[in-house]
Image (cartoon, helix red, strand yellow):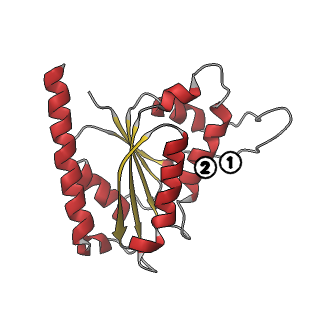
Amino acid sequence: MMKIMTLLGSSRKDGNTAYLTDKALDGIEHKRVFLLDKQLNPIKRHDKDGFETVDDDYEALFFEFLKYDTYFFVTPVYWFGMSGQMKIFFDRWSQYMKDKRIDFWEAFRGKKAYVIVTGEKPDPKTAALPLIQQFNYIFQYMDMEFVDYVIGKGNKPNDILSDGYALEKMKMWNSEMKTQLKLTTNIN
């Protein structure tokens, strides 16, 4: 059975990205994590002694994250990139690449990734493409499957309700995932 985790990088829990996520996963069991609810501190890289211990919520979140096989990475476009909390989430992977408690590369291989982003101007359907490309490169590097993405247009609360394309795509994802879950359940 698919185990799904959503990582939401927005500063608003009821914002446009969260709305799209709710539509994509309506009626589907998943773990929802608002990164802003976690204390995630940046790390100092390339220190000759390795990484310093960081006293925050990251390690517990990271090891819980590894238990899932399908991820929704959800972020508004902030200055043409992902939110700061989402970026810290990825940056901190560097700490675990040589961690003897896990086979880092194998832990990610074959996992599925979806990306939901929203923005306003310039037109996010093109302005957010470099961010989508960044996610794509991250997933390629980790041997993860980049299943799909959506770029929604919206900034203020409920702006996303005017983006028919993004809303329809979330319906499609929801239907496809429910079919996939049904098939997986029937096989088991």
Q: Amino acid at mark 1?
A: Pro
Q: Amino acid at mark 2?
A: Ile
Percent x, y for residue 180?
A: 20, 36
Q: Is residue 131 above or below residue 4?
A: below
**Front-lying residue, 100 or 149:** 149
Residue at image coords 31%, 38%:
30
Looking at the rendered structure, the secondary structure element under dot 1 is loop
Residue at image coords 46%, 66%:
129
Image quarter where the C terminus lies is top left
Q: Is residue 119 above or below residue 60?
A: below
Residue at image coords 26%, 72%:
163
Percent x, y for residue 69?
A: 38, 32
Q: Is residue 76 above or below residue 36?
A: below
Q: Does residue 26 show up?
A: no
Cα separation between marks 1 and 2 = 6 Å
Residue at image coords 57%, 28%:
104
Which residue carries the number 1 mark? 42
Question: How many other residues sit within 10 Å of disc 1, few (<14), some (14-19) or many (≥20)?
Answer: some
Image quarter where the N terminus lies is top left
Q: Does residue 171 show up?
A: yes
Looking at the rendered structure, the secondary structure element under dot 2 is helix
Percent x, y for residue 118?
A: 40, 66
Task: Report the number of discs.
Answer: 2
**Front-lying residue, 68 or 56:** 68
Q: Is residue 166 above or below residue 149?
A: below
Q: Is residue 52 left or right of residue 77?
A: right
Q: Is residue 155 left or right of residue 92?
A: left
User: Residue farthest to the right?
Assistant: 48
Tell me the tag on residue 88.
Answer: 2
Percent x, y for residue 49?
A: 84, 32
